[in-house]
Amino acid sequence: MKNSFITKTLFASFSLLALCTPQSAHAQIIPQPWVSVGSQEGDITYSVGARALNLGAELGFGPDGATGVDVLKFISLPVVSPYVGLGYYSADKGVAFSGGVQVGASDNVFVGVGYNSVRGINGQLGVRF
């Protein structure tokens, strides 16, 4: 019980910090799409997402036919972009929490790793225009 409370408090704190972080003036307006493949409870999960102005949205497909949408908030740093998110999934999965990091692999390609409480751990591959 105590560990659960501490975990939820830390997650809420980091989420609020991410929402209150000022956006840089040169934030990219052109969306940056990505695809993601992961695993949860032995099932393959996948999603597609896009990011613009340090906000993102992800359409995910989880185990047991669960489908949902996550809203993400990114913190833009020079090389890496950590994020936190909140979503809602069908098939009685309910609210989902997510977090992860995306890293620029080249000028036009980025990779990432994330965790979603419904879709599990996932790897991401995306492109910048």
Image (cartoon, helix red, strand yellow):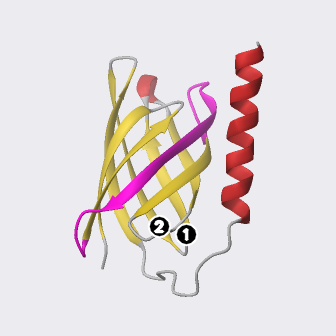
Q: Which residue is mark 1?
A: 54
The amino acid on which the numbered mark 1 sits, given as a three-letter code, is: Asn
Relative to 5, residue 89 above or below: below
Q: Is residue 59 left or right of residue 3?
A: left
Q: How far across and down, in percent of the image, does residue 10 sit? A: 71, 37
Question: What amino acid type should be assigned to the residue bearing mark 2?
Answer: Arg
Residue name at image x 48 percent, y 53 percent: 58
Chief secondary structure of the magenta portion: strand
Magenta stretch in the rendered image: 88-108
Q: Which residue is mark 2?
A: 51
Q: Which residue sits at x=72%, y=31%?
A: 8
Q: From the top left corner, tell me how far across and down residue 4 is, in percent.
A: 71, 20
Instruction: Inspect the magenta stretch and tell me whether residue 89 lies in it.
Output: yes
Q: Residue at x 77, y 16 (%)?
A: 2
User: Farthest residue in the bottom direction?
Assistant: 25
Mark 1 neighbour density, 10 Å: few (under 14) some (14–19) many (20 or more): many
Kindly check if marks 1 and 2 are in contact, taking CB atoms under 8 A apart as contact.
yes
Q: Nearer the viewer, residue 116 or 61?
A: 116
